[in-house]
Amino acid sequence: MTQQTTKPHRTTAAPTTIRKALVFFRVMAVVVGIGLLLLTTQVILRYGFDNHVLDWWPQPHGFIFIIYVVATANLGFKAGWSLLRMVLVMLAGCVPFLSFYIEHRMTRYVQAHLAGTPSA
């Protein structure tokens, strides 16, 4: 009995499904980026100026971030990303302004993948 080793096969969804997942991801990346800037403002106001006007924001931001994680996983699994790429894109939502840059890079990456052009 011989044992065969095979590479894991990445399954990708239909291009239409990937495009829809990309739109959802793009919207959520922008929303979470804006939300993170608002959260940063809340922290500065609260701890720097003892102003509690945005104390309501952390919980909605957490919910929005969870939706961003779902959007990233949705796109990642459909587009055949590695788990490492998905996690790094998810973590980009934790750094102010980085989600905007990563949204742009991943959009170009997925569009190049759909067009059949190799991309970084």
Image: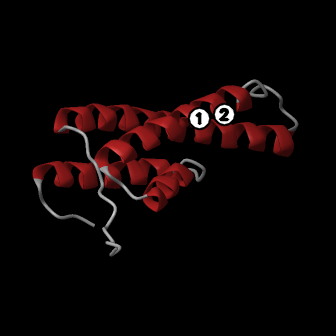
How many callouts does the rendering have?
2
For the C terminus, the image quarter is bottom left
Of residues 60 and 4, the one nearer the viewer is 4
Mark 2 Cα within 10 Å, few/some/many (few <14, many 20+)? some
Q: In the rendering, at what x and y percent does residue 73 appear?
A: 45, 43
Q: Residue at x 19, y 54 (%)?
A: 113
Percent of width and height locating residue 80: 32, 51
Residue 25 image-quadrant placement = top left
Left or right: 62, with 90 as reference point: right
- List the residue tagged with mark 1: 66
Dot 1 alpha-carbon crowd within 10 angstroms: few under 14, some 14 to 19, many 20 or more:
some
Q: Is residue 90 above or below residue 56?
A: below
- Frontmost residue, 120 versus 38: 120
Amino acid identity at mark 1: Ile
SS for dot 2 = helix
Question: Mark 2–mark 1 contact, CB under 8 Å?
Answer: yes
Q: Is residue 111 above or below residue 14?
A: below
Q: Position of residue 51 (x, y in %)?
A: 83, 32
Query: Which amino acid type corresponds to the residue marked 2 in the rendered image?
Result: Gly
Residue depicted at 40% across the width and 59% down the height: 82
Q: Secondary structure at mark 1?
A: helix
Q: Which residue is mark 2?
A: 62
The quadrant the N terminus occupies is bottom left
Q: Residue at x 32, y 42 (%)?
A: 78
Q: Foreground: 65 or 21?
A: 21
Give residue 20's position: percent from left, percent from top: 28, 31
Q: Going 78% across and 38% down the picture, which residue do you hit? A: 45
